[in-house]
Image: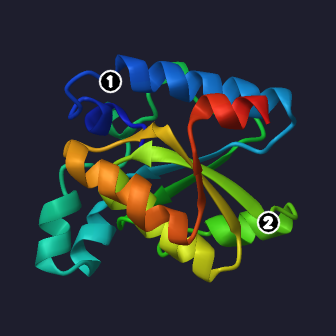
Amino acid sequence: MDFQNAIVEMLEDPEPLLERAEQTIAVARSRGMTIAYVRVGVTDEDLAAAPPAAAERFGRLRDGDPQTAIVGRLAPAEGDIVVRKVRVGAFSTTDLESQLRARGIEALVLTGIATSGVVLSTVRDAFDKDFHVTVLADVCADRDAEVHRVLIEKVFPRQADVVPLAQWSSA
């Protein structure tokens, strides 16, 4: 979630995270799992309908701008789900839930930037929607390492299985 050029560039050293994200996608594809991409990209219409604070927060992430594209090395393949959102979480402004349900998907493996943004919002919402949620702890990142740690160690385990990529890959 949100592995977009503009968002990845906000991380101090994104390379290790991107390598783990590539590995995650490769493992998921080898297992026949569905890959879903969630990205932020706002239009003029979205901004006009949003309250000023939201418009200010998301206004720089203009749909169609190369900065809102998924990082090339993680690019979606044919058959992947790709949704565009205009808020923080993956569900509230997308049809992601209906696409997942239509495919019979009941369990989610979440990765993304930022742990305190899209990952937190999506963990909570997915749990409330009765999905089984797994968070890959080391395939999520946040600019605040302490916030990331607290969420991964203390908050997410209440509603999700939280494991490192290596453990998930070998399961």
Label 1 neighbour load within 10 Å: few <14, some 14-19, many 20+: few
Q: Residue at x 72, y 72 (%)?
A: 98
Left or right: residue 6 versus residue 125 is: left
Whether residue 42 sits left or right of residue 72 in the image: it is left
Residue 4 appears anywhere in the view: yes
In space, the residues marked 2 and 1 are separated at their CA atoms by: 30 Å
Q: Amino acid at mark 1?
A: Pro
Where is residue 101 drawn, in percent x and y?
79, 70
Q: Which mark is residue 106?
A: 2
Q: Nearer the viewer, residue 102 or 65?
A: 102
Tag 1 residue: 14
Residue nearer the viewer, 131 or 47: 131
Instruction: Locate residue 66, reporting x and y percent.
Output: 34, 31
Q: Is residue 42 visible?
A: no
Residue 73: give x, y in percent of width and height: 52, 19
User: Could you tell me which residue is drawn at 35 percent across and 67 percent down?
Assistant: 87
